[in-house]
Amino acid sequence: MEAILQQNLPQEQIDRIATYIIETRLAPAIEEFVRKNETRIRELSIIERVIRVEEELKALREIESARFDATEKRLEALQREINARLDATEKRFEAMDKRFEALQREMVARFEVTEKRFEAMDKRFEALQREMNALLDATEKRLEALQREMNARFEATEKRFEAMDKRFEALQREIAARFEAVDKKFSVLQWSIGIGFSVLTILLTLFRFIPK
């Protein structure tokens, strides 16, 4: 091979020789090597794949570990934030409880004052009711007394009117009797005057017929 290379041969011939050598010697040797080491190559391939898988798993574990660490940190931060918010909310509820307690005490005090005022008003209404009842009783008694007095006065007035009626009736009878007496006297007088005028007329007539 060295003798061939030392000769001044064209490049094309050298390439053909190299190709021939590769095809006649190197290729069968490689094939024989491959056949002999095929199992080893497969083992190496499997080992390489296992290594790659382990590296990938390691990388994945590192990624997952980092993600878990980040998630844990986020959860811790979230937990702290939640705790802070819960503390703030608890404080607000405590403040609200205190305000409600103060409001409840104030409302109880106001209700007690209102209840006392209503009790005082009830007492005043009861006193006013008793006073009104007393006034109504007194007024009723006065009205009853006034009614009795008025009834007595009406009875007395009625008796006086009855007495006056009797007196008017007696006076009417007396006046009627007097008018009857006057009528009788007037009738007698009328008859007397008529008779007198008749006698006078007769006498005048007679005096005319008596000679002088």
Image: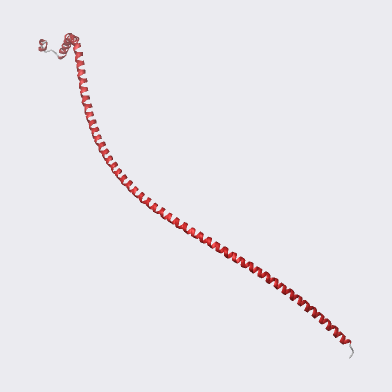
Q: Name the residue: 43% across, 54% down.
A: 126
Give whichever of 16, 162 is nearer the camera.
162
Tell me how the rendering is colored.
Answer: secondary structure
Q: How many marks?
A: 0
Query: Please, is residue 61 above or below residue 131 in the view?
Result: above
Image quadrant holding the C terminus, namely: bottom right
Query: Please, is residue 72 above or below residue 48 in the view?
Result: below
Rendered image quadrant of residue 178? bottom right
Q: Name the residue: 66% across, 70% down.
A: 168
Give whichever of 98, 42 is nearer the camera.
98
Q: Name the residue: 45% across, 56% down.
A: 130
Q: Position of residue 79 (x, y in %)?
A: 25, 34
Q: Where is residue 80 in the image (x, y as percent from the top left)?
A: 24, 36
Image quadrant holding the N terminus, namely: top left
Q: Position of residue 165 (x, y in %)?
A: 65, 68
Is residue 198 found left or right of 152 in the rendered image? right
Rendered image quadrant of residue 92? top left
Q: Name the residue: 87% across, 85% down.
A: 206
Most extreme residue toward the bottom is 212
Query: Please, is residue 132 above or below residue 190 in the view?
Result: above
Rendered image quadrant of residue 13? top left
Give whichever of 207, 160 is nearer the camera.
160
Q: Position of residue 56 (x, y in %)?
A: 21, 22
Query: Please, is residue 93 above or below residue 190 in the view?
Result: above
